[in-house]
């Protein structure tokens, strides 16, 4: 049962697409106070667990900390970070009373989940203009399924997007890309995608190609011949440059976000000063989305949308203020405080709250200040692309994912989790975040494997890849200036070949489970407690995940570990993909175990009485041989495989299923 309560005059976000009957009065649990903005308080029982929040910091159980939905470009995902790139306002209280809450509110919203007061859940925001959905069911998992029904089906990428991808900020020339392709192919490490970061553009101008690619279509074609898809980045800000068509058209048609005085708002991002397309306006979405055709016409079939919180490095107004402060600094006596203030002033230039209140959107003729709808920007930029790509190629799926997001965007594209670091703690964070993202509808997701910022190590990369084998988006990405982390740059490349190879051996299974989750509004990666709700021990497990209906994963995420402890909520079969290509099997009883996991081994648990299909090693998705499929797991069991052509949008659940024996 879902109840909807409307307070004030909410902004329409279009995150919920199924109509839910309006309820009067107040929700059954918790208290609502409307005297100062909106406040929902609920007294949690000591053992209550709180799930949800999608792309948020810390654990699967969100209890014990504070989180703010405020899409932020902050590359330092520290333990104390309260806002990341997404805003996913869905939580589930599970325990003495079990219910879900979705707060459809596109501005800043805070979830204090037992942080200020240990037993108090406090959800608060500035304006009491929102829709509150309260979902009742037996358990957390059923609440997720109900929620997913009202927000619509998750985005489905083409099958090649389940292959492995290499990315790095800093590939500039055709040769750079060919070298990456060569590095992988020559070492027989599987790969399906190479990502094109901002340097493929002419001076970081969206929808342009730099002179380094004299015949771009031919370049794309050549790569495809080698089963490699090139995936370019598109940034939110449009460079201000006379004669640049996207800029000129945007200005002429009033398609950019405006300042209060009606002039186009200016913010510096990678290209220097830019304007932000007002993607909250449907006409602008159509215009901006249609631009992707310039690249699809050259054979491009995938994109990543970036900087769409939108990120602001600084504004001319911010710089003016800073210059004034500098002058004052120069003309006054130097003190420790004045030096520190100046330093802070520079640090504060980026993503400054003042800048987010200095521009406006035109939403169906209504002028809305940006901060009131801040969390909808990335959603609508990706919606613009998603809708356009569907029009451009109605029969063909396109790969699309975004950095910033709001619930509802999951219908148009996936997400990656932004600028993490080459830290072991970020591998663990990646593990914990995946099921929460699935709860909010984001199924096609993954982190920058190996870590984006800072220098990775061979061991960290291998362990992260061994987890990435199971995340729908499997991409190795690194920042400019960091240690090179293409797999062939390390010793003993055969270990990388093997670990990534396991992804390809499991690909039909992973794809099948992903598709079942997407088509049934279900989850692909789940906390153990969702499958074993009566198992008290399972509730505490945050570093193992249930995968699909048949499997459980237990990644290694510590340096120098030879293996790890696992908890089995029931008897399971541990299979290990060994470097010689063989698969070892061992049945293990319910309970705690230590398992040894050498760096070049990928372990997987199969649930009692089940089995999964495995195919032979392949170097690209197109080269997978379906005839090599065999079942691994409990004898006598069968598997229901979902299969389709991998690129059309004909997802027919019943006719695309077959039993594998
Ligand atoms: C942002 C993105 C990152 C990209 C960089 C340069 O930091 O999150 O993935 O490499 O911009 O475009």
Image: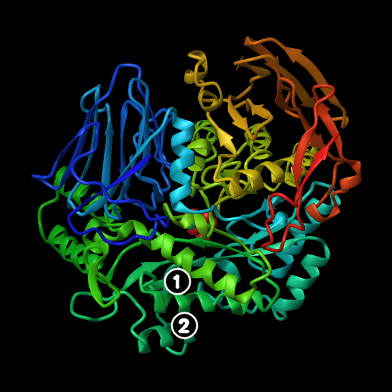
Please tell me in which quadrant of the rendered image residue 558 appears. Answer: top right
Residue drawn at x 48%, y 20% as measured from the top left: 539
Going by the image, does 576 lie left or right of 37?
A: right
Whether ligand 1 has any atom under 8 Å from the Cβ at mark 2 is answered as no
Q: Are marks 2 and 1 in contact (CB under 8 Å)?
A: no
Label 2 packing within 10 angstroms: few (<14), some (14-19), many (20+) = many
Q: Looking at this rendering, what residue extends furthest in the right direction?
A: 627
Viewer can see residue 626: yes
Residue drawn at x 34%, y 60% as measured from the top left: 13
Going by the image, does 196 lie left or right of 84?
A: right
Q: Is residue 95 above or below residue 176?
A: above
Going by the image, does 553 lie left or right of 541?
A: right
Residue drawn at x 37%, y 87% as measured from the top left: 253
Q: Residue 560 at what x, y percent from top left?
A: 64, 22
Disc 1, SS? loop
Nearer to the camera, 56 or 244: 56
The label shown at residue 246 is 2
Q: Residue 171 at what x, y percent from top left?
A: 64, 62
Nearer to the camera, 256 or 290: 290
Q: Is residue 451 above or below residue 396?
A: above
Going by the image, does 286 lie left or right of 160?
A: left
Q: How many marks on residues?
A: 2
Q: How is the image coloured?
A: rainbow
Disc 2, SS? helix
Mark 1, residue position: 271
Give me the C-alpha separation between circle 2 and circle 1. 14 Å
Quadrant for the C terminus, please.
top right
Label 1 packing within 10 angstroms: few (<14), some (14-19), many (20+) = some
């Amino acid at each position: 049962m879902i109840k909807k309560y409307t307070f004030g005059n909410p902004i329409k976000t279009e995150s919920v697409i199924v109509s839910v009957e309006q309820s009067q009065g107040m929700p059954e649990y918790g208290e609502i106070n409307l005297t100062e903005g909106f406040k929902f308080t609920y007294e949690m029982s000591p053992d209550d667990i709180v799930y949800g929040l999608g792309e948020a910091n810390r654990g699967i159980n969100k209890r014990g900390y504070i989180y703010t939905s405020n899409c932020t470009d902050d590359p330092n995902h520290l333990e104390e970070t309260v806002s990341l790139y997404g805003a996913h306002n869905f939580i589930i209280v599970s325990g003495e009373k079990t219910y879900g809450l979705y707060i459809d509110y596109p501005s800043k919203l805070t979830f204090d989940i037992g942080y200020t007061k240990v037993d108090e859940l406090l959800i608060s925001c500035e304006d009491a203009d929102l829709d509150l959905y309260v979902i009742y069911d037996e358990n957390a998992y059923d609440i997720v399924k109900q929620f997913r029904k009202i927000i619509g089906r998750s985005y489905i990428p083409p099958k090649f997007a389940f292959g492995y991808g290499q990315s790095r900020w800093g590939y500039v020339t055709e040769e750079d890309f060919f070298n990456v392709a060569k590095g992988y192919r020559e070492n027989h490490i599987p790969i399906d995608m190479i990502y094109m970061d901002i340097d493929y553009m002419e001076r970081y101008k969206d929808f342009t190609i730099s002179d380094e690619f004299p015949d771009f279509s031919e370049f794309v074609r050549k790569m495809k011949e080698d089963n490699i898809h090139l995936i370019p980045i598109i940034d939110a800000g449009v460079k201000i440059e006379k004669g640049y068509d996207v800029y000129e058209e945007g200005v002429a048609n009033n398609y950019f976000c405006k300042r209060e005085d009606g002039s186009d708002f200016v913010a510096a991002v990678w290209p220097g000063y830019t304007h932000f397309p007002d993607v909250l306006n449907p006409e602008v979405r159509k215009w901006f989305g249609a631009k992707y055709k310039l690249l699809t016409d050259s054979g491009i079939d995938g994109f990543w949308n970036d900087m769409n919180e939108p990120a602001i490095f600084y504004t001319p107004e911010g710089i003016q203020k800073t210059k004034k402060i500098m002058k004052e600094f120069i003309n006054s006596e130097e003190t420790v405080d004045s030096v520190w203030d100046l330093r802070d002033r520079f640090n504060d230039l980026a993503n400054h709250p003042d800048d987010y209140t200095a521009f406006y959107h035109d939403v169906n003729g209504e002028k809305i200040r940006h901060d009131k709808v801040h969390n909808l920007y990335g959603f609508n930029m990706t919606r613009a692309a998603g809708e356009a790509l569907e029009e451009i190629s109605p029969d063909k799926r396109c790969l699309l994912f975004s950095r910033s997001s709001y619930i509802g965007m999951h219908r148009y594209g996936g997400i990656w989790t932004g600028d993490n670091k080459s830290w072991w703690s970020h591998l663990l964070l990646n593990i914990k975040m995946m099921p929460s993202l699935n709860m909010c509808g984001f199924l096609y997701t993954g982190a920058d494997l190996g870590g984006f910022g800072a220098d990775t190590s061979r061991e960290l990369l291998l362990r992260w890849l061994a987890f990435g084998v199971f995340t729908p988006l499997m991409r190795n990405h690194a920042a400019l200036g960091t240690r090179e982390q293409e797999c062939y740059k390390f010793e003993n490349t055969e270990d990388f070949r093997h670990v990534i190879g396991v992804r390809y051996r499991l690909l039909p299974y992973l794809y099948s489970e992903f598709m079942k989750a997407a088509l049934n509004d279900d989850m692909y990666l789940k906390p153990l407690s969702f499958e074993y709700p009566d198992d008290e021990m399972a509730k505490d497990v945050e570093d193992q995940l249930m995968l699909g209906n048949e499997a459980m994963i237990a990644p290694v995420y510590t340096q120098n570990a030879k293996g790890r402890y696992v908890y089995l909520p029931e008897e399971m079969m541990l299979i290990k993909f060994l470097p010689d290509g063989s698969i070892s099997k061992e049945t293990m009883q319910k309970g705690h175990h230590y398992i040894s996991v050498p760096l070049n081994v990928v372990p997987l648990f199969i649930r009692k009485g089940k089995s999964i299909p495995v195919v032979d090693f392949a170097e690209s998705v197109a080269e997978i041989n379906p005839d090599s499929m065999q079942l691994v797991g409990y004898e006598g069991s069968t598997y229901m495989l979902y299969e389709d052509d991998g690129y059309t949008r004909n997802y027919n659940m019943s006719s695309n299923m077959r039993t594998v024996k």
